[in-house]
Image (cartoon, rainbow, N blue to C red):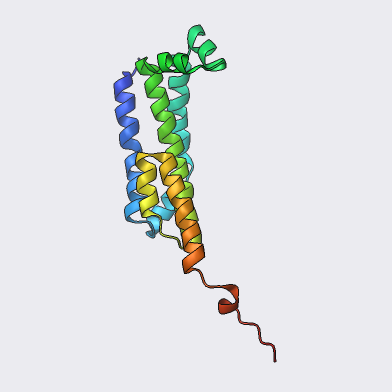
Amino acid sequence: MTIPIDQIFNVANLFVLPFWALMIILPNWGVTRKVMESYLPFVLLACVYLYLFISSINPENAAALSNPKLSDIAHFFADENAAATGWIHFLVMDLFVGRWIYWDGQKTGIWTSHSLAFCLFAGPFGLLSHILTHWISKLFFSQSQSEINPVSNS
């Protein structure tokens, strides 16, 4: 039994949304922390990716991917199976980067909701947003070590 590619695409899109919602809307909730500790969502999505990748490779596509030229890649992604494979790749990697942003925010206390929202819609932009937020937070909002642990010279 073959599952139609558009159903795989739609289910994968819906699958990631609860994880994003938890990280963005309820970042400090214990359930969010527990859910985001797991690698299971990435394993499931990576398996879907692997299935689509294997099913979309033929000798012509393999040759195009082994020595990529822009025109060959554009031709490859013109195929629905290849486009769905690429999209699932984005979903997996963006969610993984989002998880890293989430955990970095939990560890450092830096606000991440905006960066996570950007990451959901444009992964690298969300990563850049978080890096800039981290730098700005450290520069303007973190106390110096001397204020935290004053050293007595007496």
Rendered-image quadrant of the C terminus: bottom right
Does residue 37 appear in the picture of this structure? no
Rendered-image quadrant of the N terminus: top left
Does residue 94 appear in the picture of this structure? yes
Q: Give the residue displayed 29% in from the left and 24% down from the top.
A: 7
Q: Say which of 116 and 133 sits in front.
A: 133
Q: Give the residue displayed 33% in from the left and 44% down from the top.
A: 18
Q: Say which of 104 and 64 sits in front.
A: 64
Q: Is residue 90 above or below residue 119?
A: above
Q: Quadrant of residue 78?
A: top left
Residue at the bottom extreme, as displayed: 154
Q: Give the residue displayed 50% in from the left and 58% down from the top.
A: 135
Where is residue 12? Give x, y as percent.
Answer: 35, 31
Q: Say which of 86 and 12 sits in front.
A: 86
Where is residue 120? Give x, y as percent.
Answer: 36, 42
Where is residue 147? Give x, y as percent.
Answer: 56, 78
Where is residue 39? Give x, y as percent.
Answer: 49, 42
Q: Is residue 33 above or below residue 55?
A: below
Please give left or right for residue 71 compared with residue 14 in the image. Answer: right
Residue at the top extreme, as displayed: 59
Q: Is residue 73 above or below residue 120?
A: above
Q: Give the residue displayed 44% in from the left and 26% down from the top.
A: 49
